Amino acid sequence: MSGEGSDEADEEDEEVAVAASGSEVVDWDAPDELPLHERGFMRRDRERRLKAGWNY
């Protein structure tokens, strides 16, 4: 085993296992794909944190 490409295969196996288990993978880098109520919550939560002076 040269080890070349084995990391990619492991990642693909994990994705297939998650898909097969039926649990939803949430990609936080793509908020537009979230349901509307979750997008609204994230926006309001961010506004609340900014008002409190939290800068993240």
Image: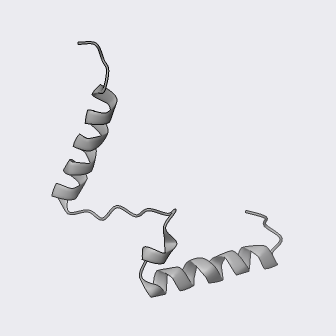
Find residue 53 and report its horizontal and vertical position in percent.
Answer: 83, 71
In the rendered view, tell whether residue 6 sits above or below residue 17: above
19 lies above or below 30: above
Q: Position of residue 37 (x, y in %)?
A: 47, 87
Q: Nearer the viewer, residue 45 or 5?
A: 5
The relative height of residue 30 versus residue 20 in the rendered view (above or below) is: below
Number of numbered tags placed on the structure image: 0
The scheme the figure's colours follow is one colour
Q: Residue 46, located in which quarter of the rendered image?
A: bottom right
Q: Residue furthest top?
A: 1
Drawn side of residue 18 relative to residue 28, left or right: left
Q: Residue at x 27, y 49 (%)?
A: 15
Image quadrant occupied by the C terminus: bottom right
| Left or right of 32, for residue 18 | left
Q: Residue furthest right?
A: 53
Asked if residue 12 lies left or right of residue 51, the reply is left
- Picture residue at 73% right of the left edge, 73% below the top: 49
Q: Quarter-wise, where is residue 3 in the image?
A: top left
Report the residue that reaches farthest toward the left: 20
Residue nearer the viewer, 56 or 12: 12
**Is 6 located above or below residue 21 in the figure?**
above
**Residue at x-position 42% and y-position 75%:** 33
Quadrant containing the N terminus in the rendered view: top left
Residue 13 appears at what percent x and percent y?
Answer: 22, 41
> What residue sits 80% from the left and 79% below the top?
51
